[in-house]
Amino acid sequence: MTTCTTPDCYRVTSLYLCTDCIIELDSLLADVGPLLQFIGGAIDQTAVTRSPGASGGGGGHAKSQPAMNVDAYLLRAWLHQLPERAHATAMDNPKAGEILFMARDWVQRARDLVWGPEDKRVYGQCEELLEGEDQDDDPIPCDGRLVAHPDDVTVKCPSCNTVHHVSEVMDKLRLKARGVPMPPRAVREYLQRKTKVVILKKDFENWVQLGRLRYVLDRVTTTRKPQRVYYPGDVLRVFEYMHGRRRMRV
Ligand SMILES: [Zn+2]
Ligand SMILES: [Zn+2]
């Protein structure tokens, strides 16, 4: 028995965090995925406010360098360093308290930046499929913007009035961050292109062997044996976890 490693928390625990702090860290970490999904927009936001109308293309102001939101850029890097699971952190990281201390600050700042002030949260677009004007038209996804109070369980779309469950909207965002499953080499190339993250073949194979990376079987081809394919989002999460852990331990 010892005390929790979180600054100013003196509760007794057998792990590096007390139960209260594990719960708090867990709820902070749950928001990291969706926040990372949107923070890219916040990084480019200043460019939009500085030159209105330039985004239409061919505008006269196109030459001006887009300004970047440096705070958002740094925040993204910090969020990437956070571990994936609160309980695992409490079990095996002697600096778990420090991580919680930083997570409070980083996640709160990212929430303010991405979701706006405490009284509202932006959950992206509605995407409810709506009938086209003509009966033969393909249904089109609604582009209504979903905004709700942080305590709201449901959110109503302002343009089509569909009521969404916030938990379902969050699940959809997490799923989107996962991407389409593909074979190992394609995943590594995809992530390098999209996120500039370089993953070594050896590391990838290690993660699979350690059981950190789960695969799905691709059954589309009938001529070949089903192939093991991986979600890019899963691979990126493992990369971030391993990378973050290496840094935190230094
Ligand atoms: Zn504690
Ligand atoms: Zn809608």
Image (cartoon, rainbow, N blue to C red):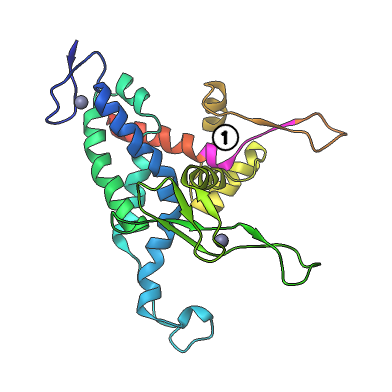
Q: Identify the residue at the far top of this view.
A: 1
| Quadrant of res 132 | bottom right
- The residue that appears at 36% across and 53% down in the rendered structure is 149
| Quadrant of res 84 | top left
- Compared to residue 152, the image places residue 7 above or below, namely above
Ligand 1, seen in the image, is in the quarter at top left
Tell me where residue 68 appears, x and y as whole percent: 35, 67
**The residue at label 1 has a CB less than 8 Å from ligand 1:** no
- Taking the image as shown, residue 226 lies to the left or right of residue 230, namely right
- Taking the image as shown, residue 89 lies to the left or right of residue 189, namely left
| Quadrant of res 90 | top left
- Compared to residue 67, the image places residue 197 above or below, namely above
- The residue that appears at 35% across and 28% down in the rendered structure is 86
Residue type at mark 1 is: Lys
The quarter of the picture where the C terminus appears is top left
The quarter of the picture where the N terminus appears is top left
Q: Which residue is mark 1?
A: 201
Q: Nearer the viewer, residue 177 or 199?
A: 177
- The residue that appears at 63% across and 30% down in the rendered structure is 215
Q: Bounds of the magenta span?
A: 227-235
Say whether residue 70 is magenta: no
Tell me where residue 217 appears, x and y as whole percent: 71, 31
- Compared to residue 11, the image places residue 165 above or below, namely below
